Amino acid sequence: MSRIPGAEGREPLLRVRNLTKTFTRPRGLFGGGGETVRAVDGVSFDVFPGETLALVGESGCGKTTTGRAVLRLVEPDAGEVIFDGKDILKLASEPLRKLRRRMQIVFQDPYSSLNPRMTIGQTVREGLIIHGIAEGADADTRVRQLLEEVGLRGEYAGMYPHEFSGGQRQRVGIARALSVEPAFIVCDEPVSALDVSVQAQVLNLLQDLQRDRGLAFLFIAHDLSVVEHIADRVAVMYLGRIVETASRDALYGTPRMPYTRALLSAVPVPDPAARRERVVLAGDAPSPTRPPAGCVFHPRCPDPRRDASCSATVPPLEEKARAHFAACIKEPSSLTPRDQ
Amino acid sequence: MTHTPLLAIENLRTYFHTDAGVARAVDGVSLAIAPGETVGLVGESGCGKTVTALSILRLVAPPGRIESGSRIVFEGRDLMELRESDIRRVRGNRIAMIFQEPMTALNPVFTVGDQVAEVARIHDAAPRKAAWQRAVDMLEQVGIPEPGLRARDYPHQLSGGMRQRVMIAMALMMKPALVIADEPTTALDVTIQAQILDLLRGLQKRFGMSLLLITHDMGVVAEMASRVVVMYGGEVVEEAPVARIFSQPQHPYTEGLLAAMPRMGRAQERLTTIPGTVPPPTDWPDGCRFRDRCSYAWEKASEHPALTQVAPGHFARCHLALEPQRRTKAGAARG
């Protein structure tokens, strides 16, 4: 990529280049398996300090694997993940452990991501101890402050996860991530398990924390309304690749890739008076074990410009408008020579 | 409604008698569905919408119990008074149900063709071969490509969207008068959801059935329903034609729910939230069940509000319905 959206004159906090992760399905008892899936296929993006980059796409597009590979919670096969100037993929375990203090994750499921045998105070305290941030009475004070910062009461420290609602548990997960004072948090579908009224509370909390602490988020989500609300920039994934990336307003206002257009038009609008053009995609997403040749989206692409060249050429992620990249050979660039 | 409803639920109470106390999951729900109508039943987890649906088919398992005094009148008969063998003739025949997760609702060890055909074998005593042919026809009608081949597949061989189509084929096999769809697209990706909603709309037009659509997604409601029933705390708190629910919600909970949703194309700095959380069903507050979370609540909240008509076809369970001037005052005070 020649230029990354929003990159003008700033240094990224996180720089991901050509990240690739393949999985091989184990052979089953009755045969089958053995196929290789390119879950993440040459993904590149930057995250700048204090911003939210949203990674969106449907199930199986590779967004969650990307988030985990960035933190080396799954080991990528290839690529670079530069954080604070260091390539995380080349770090030995000790320096990696130190760097993890700066990079945290909040998981989707607030039920399975907290240890049921630990009080929430112990859960939040753990990071403080491991990273030598505080101990003894200092740590207790810090735990209370953190719980209060995420909108829980300090007294709750002695209670267990099952005593809390889903929204409250997600707050505990956020407090745990914050405990080590990170600069960057991967938020993996942090509100999709929550009811809408509670979802709004948690989204507001994340935005407040970002503003107060200057946090950067890689926000992984499938809900396009939530993403439009929270993101500064958006990257759309399909079958392991980023197919479009731009500022939020550009991506929602003038999507350049037919898949993005279809995705946006598929979202039900909470307005009974709204009448609009819906692009209903035929069929399912193809299996990632056998991705189509050329553009991975071409078998489902509803765009009238689609032709034989779409199945022959792998479209590069190209800049179609200023800081707006899309992987579609049929989409003309509106860049003027002066822009380039 | 002027004509006879297809289904009229009257004062339905379904309680769960647990060690932790009596959970009043559904607590005095009344609602009606006209022939051919789509009613959206909305609310958040624990509001009682799914238990309401299961109660209609008498599928509530102990410790759950439909309390006496509840009436479920369908095609002129009170389903509560039917014998088990008679209610079985209603289930899957006159009233069919589509569940959220087709993978758990389908039997993994039978082909999908067998499972769709079984519906005709049970309810019509159709011979094996004829039932199979009807199943293949039905699979075609729900948009499954190469239905003759796919009928021989097992559920795990199909995608989530295709499995949901199979569920819909099973539900529509007997051309039921009422289909209850409980979050039919919640587990699906947004592009597949659009396909399934399209399909349901088309099939409803073709077969003329009524649809009770249970969902938490106000977008789905706006696109599918003509009337909306909002539940909170085991009760109906608002009921209105779909346009009015969105343009003039009368219950503060409905208002809060709509305001808390991020909406595409309507940028806002902060989302409006409903403070607090839903109380547990063993412990609904006395009086108005929404009182602790309501920004309008005044002394009157200690009395249990009745479902009150505010406009033709529009009802709200809120004291504001009788004292609307308090709404503007509270609004002004909040700036």
Image (spheres, rainbow, N blue to C red):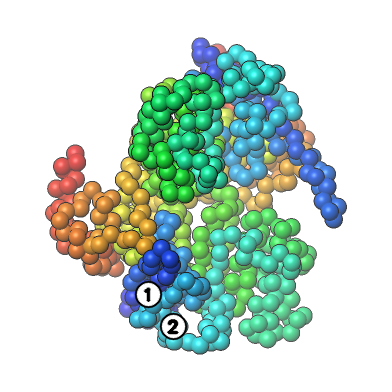
Is there CB contact under 8 Å for labels 1 and 2? no
Measured along the vertical axis of the image, is residue A150 above or below residue B17? above
Q: Would residue B155 be seen by someone viewing this image from the given angle?
A: yes
Q: Secondary structure at mark 1?
A: strand
Measured as percent of width and height from the top left, residue B39 is found at 42, 66
Q: Secondary structure at mark 2?
A: helix
Subunit of label 2: B
Q: Look at 31% across and 61% down and name the residue there.
A: B284
Of residue B188 and residue A66, the one placed in the foreground of this image is A66
Subunit of label 1: B
Q: Would residue A339 be seen by someone viewing this image from the given angle?
A: no
Measured along the vertical axis of the image, is residue B200 above or below residue B55? above
B13 relative position to A81: left or right: left
State which quarter of the image contains the C terminus of chain A: top right
Residue located farthest toward the right when viewing the structure as drawn: A31
Of residue A10 and residue A313, the one placed in the foreground of this image is A10
Residue type highlighted by circle 1? Leu
Residue type highlighted by circle 2? Met
Q: Look at 31% across and 45% down and name the residue there.
A: B275
The quarter holding residue A326 reads top right
Measured as percent of width and height from the top left, residue A328 is found at 65, 33
Of residue A194 and residue A54, the one placed in the foreground of this image is A194
Residue under label 1, please give it. Answer: B12
Of residue A132 and residue B7, the one placed in the foreground of this image is A132
Q: Look at 63% across and 17% down and name the residue there.
A: A95
State which quarter of the image contains the N terminus of chain A: top right
The quarter holding residue A100 reads top right
Q: Which mark is residue B185?
A: none
Q: Look at 68% across and 67% down and name the residue there.
A: B107
Q: Earlier in the sequence, mark 1 or mark 2?
A: 1
Q: Which mark is residue B80?
A: 2
Measured as percent of width and height from the top left, residue B268 is found at 36, 36
